[in-house]
Image (cartoon, helix red, strand yellow):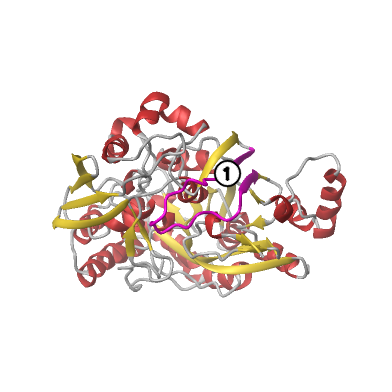
């Protein structure tokens, strides 16, 4: 469908469909393709959840958007009592959206809840380093670590939003998922699962933290699965904010005078992962996985498909992350070498497999085409994220393409600790990798951490448990009436947006 056809469809619907009025009605309408089924952010892992989390909730600490330094948010200060003990002084006078007072009980309850394996939160790596939390007094808490973990503050900035203890005890995840309550600059006023949620400015938001009070009164986040119709919504002024557009869509919108397109570098990476634990699959053999690595033209994907300055990825982590090591093992695009490896593995005619996918379908299609040329016949198995992740951890996909923005965490530990080290999504379970990650996570020196992560990365890439593809450039499109600056962590901080 062309842009003009999408616009025509939207114009035809405009008279029959009620809409907010953008700047005139002080309402920012965001259109994206994610279907939120719950708003309890501990129970979904899609990166869009970080946007909801950051606008509706607060953590103990945050990062200064200009300097990158850690600063207090719900905590006003902290100190390391030892390499495994952090003491926090909490901010007084903060209220949750339902009127509950914030204090140490909320911090203790939240952390105790999310680190309890019986509660089965999805982002377990965010709190797996915590041993215990204790209340010292009403506005002081102590977090004890299982072992030294230098990225502790980084994880607390994004991965541990604080919930109101009384409300969560009463309603549980089902209630929080429908009617969220936080302390943040915006509060949720309505939610239609799979369709939209509406945020209203929290006029009582506290001062003194890192987040300013929101300037736009209302934000409507609406699901639109048809990306062409999504573009039409922006063109007909029924939306003011799109993101995760394909490069082609961004190119088409860039010529429209009422629209501003921005291509933003991110921490997001695309990769292939293999189930190395299924002895019945040809992909359980390292030489077959190496054949796949030589078959995929990663440079062409970066240059011709992602564009916008995208680079071929050669590391497990994002290159901008702290302690991300330089690559030591790489695979040049070499179809002849791929065929040679398949022949040596006893597969001269290749083989058939499925390839899972959940986003950036055009990348998966390019990979399928490259594999076809060396005799690997891969059929796409496309899933929404929740089903995709479920198949991932249950080891039901032999090969898949995915991407991650690492939940905005600017430390390499999130890459290695989420996908390897015997985490639920680790499909290699390699003790050499696990031991190297354990050493890295317990080392304070950035130089030493980087060395241990390199040991893990070299093993991962040598065995091709993971094939890095490309660093993703995020394509945004905005109404020119909107003043908004994207950030590399892909968190859309609506409270920093304003009308021109």
Note whether 185 is above or below 342 in the view shown: above
Residue sitting at x 40%, y 48%: 58
Q: Position of residue 91 (x, y in %)?
A: 31, 49
Residue sitting at x 46%, y 34%: 98
Q: Residue furthest top?
A: 170
In this rendered view, identify the residue nearer to me: 451 or 151.
151
Name the residue that disc number 1 marks: 199
Left or right side of 156 for 478 = right
Q: Is residue 492 visible?
A: no
Q: Position of residue 437 (x, y in %)?
A: 24, 58
Label 1: few (<14), some (14–19) or many (≥20) C-alpha neighbours in 10 Å: many
Q: Is residue 153 magenta?
A: no
Q: Position of residue 425 (x, y in %)?
A: 38, 46
Q: Is residue 217 magenta?
A: yes
Left or right side of 83 for 151 = right
Residue sitting at x 57%, y 52%: 359
Q: Position of residue 443 (x, y in %)?
A: 18, 62
Q: Looking at the rendering, in which quadrant would you find the C terminus?
A: bottom right
Q: Residue furthest left?
A: 82
Q: State the count of labels.
A: 1
Left or right side of 225 for 310 = left
In the rendered image, which quarter is residue 364 located in?
A: bottom right
Q: Looking at the rendering, in which quadrant would you find the N terminus?
A: bottom right
Q: Which residues are magenta?
A: 195-222
Q: Secondary structure at mark 1?
A: strand
In this rendered view, identify the residue nearer to me: 457 or 463.
457
Residue sitting at x 82%, y 49%: 10
Q: Is residue 272 visible?
A: yes
In this rendered view, identify the residue nearer to me: 102 or 59.
102
Q: Main secondary structure of the magenta part?
A: loop
């Amino acid at each position: 469908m062309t842009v003009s056809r999408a616009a025509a469809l939207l114009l035809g619907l405009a008279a029959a469909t009620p809409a907010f009025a953008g700047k005139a009605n002080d309402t920012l309408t965001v259109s994206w393709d994610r279907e939120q089924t719950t708003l309890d952010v501990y129970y979904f892992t899609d990166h869009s959840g970080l946007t909801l989390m950051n606008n509706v909730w607060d953590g103990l600490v945050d990062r200064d958007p200009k300097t990158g330094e850690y600063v207090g948010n719900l905590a006003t200060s902290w100190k390391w009592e030892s390499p495994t003990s952090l003491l926090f002084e909490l901010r007084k006078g903060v209220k949750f959206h339902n009127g509950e007072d914030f204090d140490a009980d909320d911090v203790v309850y939240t952390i105790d809840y999310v680190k309890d394996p019986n509660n089965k939160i999805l982002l377990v790596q965010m709190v797996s380093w915590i041993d215990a939390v204790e209340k010292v007094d009403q506005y002081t808490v102590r977090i004890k670590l299982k072992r030294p973990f230098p990225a502790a503050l980084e994880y607390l900035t994004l991965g541990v939003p604080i919930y109101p203890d009384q409300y969560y005890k009463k309603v549980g995840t089902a209630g929080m998922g429908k009617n969220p309550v936080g302390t943040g600059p915006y509060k949720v006023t309505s939610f239609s699962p799979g369709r939209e949620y509406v945020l209203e400015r929290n006029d009582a938001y506290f001062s003194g933290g890192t987040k300013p009070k929101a300037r736009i009164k209302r934000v409507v986040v609406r699901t639109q699965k048809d990306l062409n119709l999504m573009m039409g919504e922006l063109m007909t002024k029924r939306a003011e904010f799109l993101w995760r557009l394909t490069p082609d869509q961004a190119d088409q919108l860039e010529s429209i005078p009422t629209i501003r397109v921005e291509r933003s570098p991110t921490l997001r990476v695309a990769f292939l992962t293999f189930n190395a634990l299924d002895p019945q699959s040809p992909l359980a053999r390292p030489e077959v996985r190496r054949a796949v690595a030589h078959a995929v033209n990663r440079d062409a994907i970066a240059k011709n498909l992602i564009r916008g300055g995208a680079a071929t990825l050669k590391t497990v982590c994002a290159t901008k992350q702290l302690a991300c090591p330089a690559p030591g093992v790489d695979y040049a695009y070499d179809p002849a070498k791929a065929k040679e490896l398949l022949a040596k593995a006893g597969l001269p005619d290749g083989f058939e497999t499925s390839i899972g996918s959940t986003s950036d379908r055009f990348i998966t299609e390019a990979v399928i085409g490259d594999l076809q040329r060396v005799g690997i016949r891969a059929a796409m198995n496309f899933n929404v994220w929740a089903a995709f992740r479920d198949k991932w951890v249950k080891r039901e996909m032999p090969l898949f393409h995915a991407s991650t923005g690492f939940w905005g965490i600017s430390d390499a530990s999130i890459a290695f600790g989420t996908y390897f080290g015997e985490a639920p999504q680790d499909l290699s379970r390699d003790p050499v990798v696990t031991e190297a990650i354990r050493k890295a996570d317990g080392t304070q020196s950035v130089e030493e951490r980087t060395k241990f992560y390199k040991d893990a990365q070299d093993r991962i890439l040598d065995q091709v448990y993971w094939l890095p593809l490309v660093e993703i450039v995020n394509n945004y499109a905005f109404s020119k009436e909107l003043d908004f600056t994207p950030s590399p962590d892909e968190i859309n901080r609506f409270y920093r947006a304003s009308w021109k």
